[in-house]
Amino acid sequence: MRADKDGLFQVSSDGGQTWERRGRIDGELYKVRALDAERSFVALSDGTIVETTDGGRTFEERFRP
């Protein structure tokens, strides 16, 4: 899984040779912690934390300061 600064989430099933666009997150990304191919936590620059359980297709807010 990869997250770009513009919020675009992509996944690769071949070690990074090709990428599939999955979704986009609003906000400025600070850090991504991938737990597996489908589940990740994302910290935004304002301190908000969101989670995806479907590889970046959708995101659910878990914490807002």
Image (cartoon, rainbow, N blue to C red):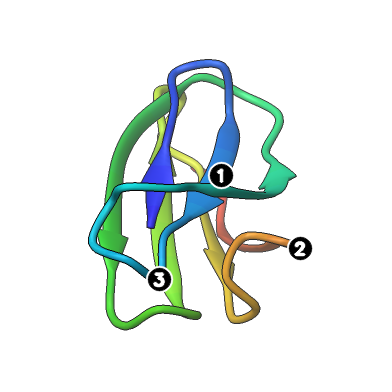
Relative to 34, does residue 31 appear above or below in the rendering?
above
Do labels 1 and 2 touch, CB within 8 Å? no
Q: Position of residue 5 (x, y in %)?
A: 44, 18
Q: Nearer the viewer, mark 1 or mark 2?
A: 1
Q: Nearer the viewer, mark 2 or mark 3?
A: 3
How far apart are the two marked residues, 1 and 2, measured between alpha carbons?
10 Å
**What is the CA distance from the residue labelled 2 to the residue labelled 3?**
19 Å
Please give the count of numbered marks on the rendered protein: 3
Question: Which residue appears at 28% of the width and 51% of the height?
Answer: 16
Q: Amino acid at mark 1?
A: Phe
Classify 10 Å Cα crowding around label 2: few (below 14), some (14-19), many (20 and above): some
> Mark 3 or mark 2, which is nearer the start of the sequence?
3
Q: Position of residue 9 (x, y in %)?
A: 56, 44
Label 3: which secondary element = loop
Identified at 32% across, 83% down, the residue is 36
Q: Quadrant of the N terminus?
A: bottom left
What kind of element bears circle 2? loop
| Amino acid beneath label 2 | Thr
Disc ID at residue 13: 3
- Which sits in the foreground, 10 or 17? 17
Residue linked to disc 1: 9
- Amino acid type indicated by mark 3: Ser
Residue at point 43%, 38% (across, down): 3
Residue corresponding to mark 2: 58
Distance of mark 3 from mark 1, alpha carbons? 14 Å
Say above or below: 62 vs 39.
above
Residue 32: percent from the left, percent from the top? 31, 49
| Residue at 43%, 48% in the rendered image | 18
Other-residue count near label 3 (Cα within 10 Å), few / some / many at <14 / 14–19 / ≥20: few
Q: Is residue 6 above or below residue 62?
A: above
